[in-house]
């Protein structure tokens, strides 16, 4: 593939320190520094990297009952999550500025008593924005709230038009169309899917959207999780809880890096944005290959708030 100077990207496959925000931020600093040293101008981290995807943790829940221990586990998860804006985000902004890179990183964001699975975008010039996962999968719904279409951004950057869709949101065809309609060129997927079948999903999106797709997953062992919380998926410290499978795919479905199931790694690829135009020559899903006379998509981008205040007019009396 032709190399474009300055268009090197990196996908981080690593483990956070689950439920420990400060320790995880220290890992982010090291990993981002290593990726920047490898020439990357954009670094993608996995889903829920700060402060952990709670794979194998039940939070003491069965249908119809919650345990006091599970409630306390949720409290610890909430305390290790981040505010947006907030101090952890400020650290990420400083890190991106110091390294001169763009970063897309999965975080657990808290607002009030609710947690959201969120992708944060930062640039050398500061915070760009966020995307909240609109549809948590299965048991994720016990601990995460639902995002809305007010956070489906695509950003114009020197590297290309940049956006993110999280994990199994990518199985929502209309959400993918919303991203394609914004001209996305670098489609980031922070994910928790470590199956070997995930590569077929990534390649399909690249072919469908005629874009570069970067997929980042964690590689974790039980030792990365709090030792005092039982895990349903592992019993020994060296047991693998998540197997990775991170990869980078080009707009014709060609695999540029990965998938890697061997351990922690940083994957690199050099992107030539001209390949996007070359790929759209015969297929542009929201352009010449669309049929708006037959099909169309409407997107409600207004923030969905539970309480909306309408001020009453002040009444005057004679």
Image (cartoon, rainbow, N blue to C red):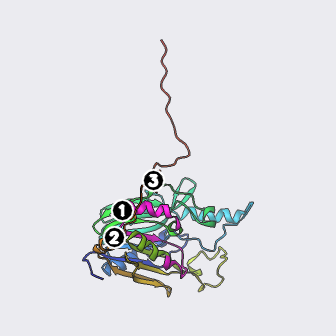
* SS for dot 3: helix
- Residue in the foreground of this view, choosing between 237 and 54: 54
Residue lying farthest to the right in this orientation: 64
| Mark nearer the viewer, 3 or 1 | 1
Q: Earlier in the sequence, mark 3 or mark 2?
A: 3
The percent position of residue 33, horizontal first and vertical second, equals 35, 77
Left or right: residue 145 versus residue 94 is right
| Mark nearer the viewer, 3 or 2 | 2
How far apart marks 3 and 1 lie (CA) works out to: 23 Å
Q: Name the residue: 47% across, 85% down.
A: 260
* SS for dot 2: helix
Q: Earlier in the sequence, mark 2 or mark 1?
A: 2
Residue corresponding to mark 1? 287
Which residues make up the magenta segment?
171-200
The percent position of residue 77, horizontal first and vertical second, equals 58, 65
Residue contact between numbered discs 2 and 1, judged by CB atoms under 8 Å = yes
Q: Residues within 10 Å of mark 3 (few under 14, many from 20)?
A: some
Left or right: residue 306 versus residue 5 is right
Residue corresponding to mark 2? 280
């Amino acid at each position: 593939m032709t190399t474009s100077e300055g268009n090197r990207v990196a996908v981080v496959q690593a483990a956070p320190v689950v439920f420990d925000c400060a320790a995880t931020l220290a890992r982010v600093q090291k990993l981002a520094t290593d990726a920047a040293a490898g020439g990357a101008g954009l670094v993608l981290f996995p889903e829920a990297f700060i402060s952990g995807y709670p794979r194998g943790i039940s939070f003491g829940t069965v249908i119809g009952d919650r345990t006091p221990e599970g409630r306390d586990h949720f409290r610890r998860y909430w305390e290790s999550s981040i505010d947006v804006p907030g101090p952890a985000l400020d650290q990420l902004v400083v890190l991106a500025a110091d390294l001169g890179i763009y970063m897309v990183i999965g975080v657990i964001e808290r607002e009030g008593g609710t947690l959201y699975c969120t992708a944060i975008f930062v640039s050398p010039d500061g915070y760009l924005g966020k995307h909240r996962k609109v549809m948590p999968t299965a048991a994720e719904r016990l601990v995460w709230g639902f995002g809305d279409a007010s956070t489906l951004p695509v950003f114009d950057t020197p590297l290309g038009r940049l956006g993110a869709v999280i994990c199994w949101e990518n199985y929502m065809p209309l959400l993918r169309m919303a991203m394609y309609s914004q001209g996305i060129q670098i489609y980031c997927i922070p994910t928790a899917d470590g199956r070997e079948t995930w590569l077929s999903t990534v390649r399909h999106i690249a072919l469908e959207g005629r874009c570069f797709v970067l997929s980042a997953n964690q590689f974790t062992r039980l030792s990365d999780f709090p030792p005092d919380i039982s895990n349903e998926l592992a019993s020994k410290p060296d047991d693998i809880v998540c197997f990775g499978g991170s990869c980078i795919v080009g707009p014709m479905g060609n695999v540029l890096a990965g998938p890697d199931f061997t351990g922690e790694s940083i994957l690199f690829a050099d992107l030539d944005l001209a390949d996007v135009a070359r790929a759209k020559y015969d297929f542009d899903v929201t352009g010449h290959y669309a049929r708006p006379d037959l099909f169309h998509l409407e997107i409600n981008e207004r923030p969905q708030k539970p309480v909306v205040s309408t001020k009453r007019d002040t009444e005057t009396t004679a």
